Image (cartoon, rainbow, N blue to C red):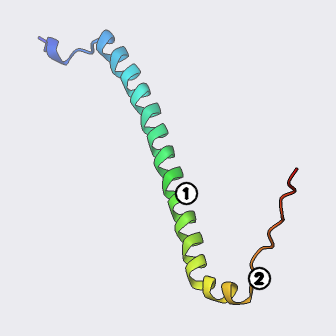
């Protein structure tokens, strides 16, 4: 006699397939968001590091910006 507990349940199989698809899509979105955030953080930190290292040279040679006078009426 076969064990009835080992028989496949089609309703459970469909439910698990749907749940797996939903979780897979959510995991993909979360991974993409985390990757975009880490890329942004790395770009910003590299930009700030370049400002830090090259800021002394650029500030010594750069002229302050000229201000325009406002016309009064």
Is 72 or 40 nearer to us in this picture?
72
Residue 68 percent across, percent down from the top left: 83, 65
Q: Residue at x 47, y 39 (%)?
A: 28
Is 29 or 11 nearer to us in this picture?
29
| Residue 2 visible in the displayed image | no
Q: Residue at x 77, y 82 (%)?
A: 63
Report which residue position mark 1 lands on: 40
Q: Is mark 2 on a helix, strand or loop?
A: loop
Place residue 24 in its image quadrant: top left
Is 48 or 26 nearer to us in this picture?
48
Residue 15 percent across, percent down from the top left: 34, 16
Query: Relative to 57, is 1 above or below?
Result: above
Place residue 64 in its image quadrant: bottom right
Sequence order check, earlier mark of 1 and 2? 1
Q: Dot 1, how many residues are within 10 Å of its Cα: few (below 14), some (14-19), or many (20+)?
A: few
Query: Relative to 57, is 19 above or below?
Result: above
Report which residue position mark 2 lands on: 63
Say whether residue 9 is left or right of residue 52: left
Q: Is mark 1 on a helix, strand or loop?
A: helix
Place residue 2 in its image quadrant: top left
Is 70 or 16 nearer to us in this picture?
70
Q: Residue at x 49, y 38 (%)?
A: 29
Query: Relative to 32, is 44 above or below?
Result: below
Residue 37 percent across, percent down from the top left: 50, 52
């Amino acid at each position: 006699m076969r064990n009835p507990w080992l028989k496949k349940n089609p309703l459970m199989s469909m439910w698990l397939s749907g749940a797996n698809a939903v979780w897979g899509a959510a995991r993909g979105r979360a991974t993409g968001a985390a990757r975009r955030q880490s890329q942004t953080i790395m770009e910003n930190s590299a930009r700030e590091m370049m400002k830090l290292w090259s800021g002394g040279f650029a500030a010594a040679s750069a002229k302050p910006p000229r201000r325009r006078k406002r016309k009064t009426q």
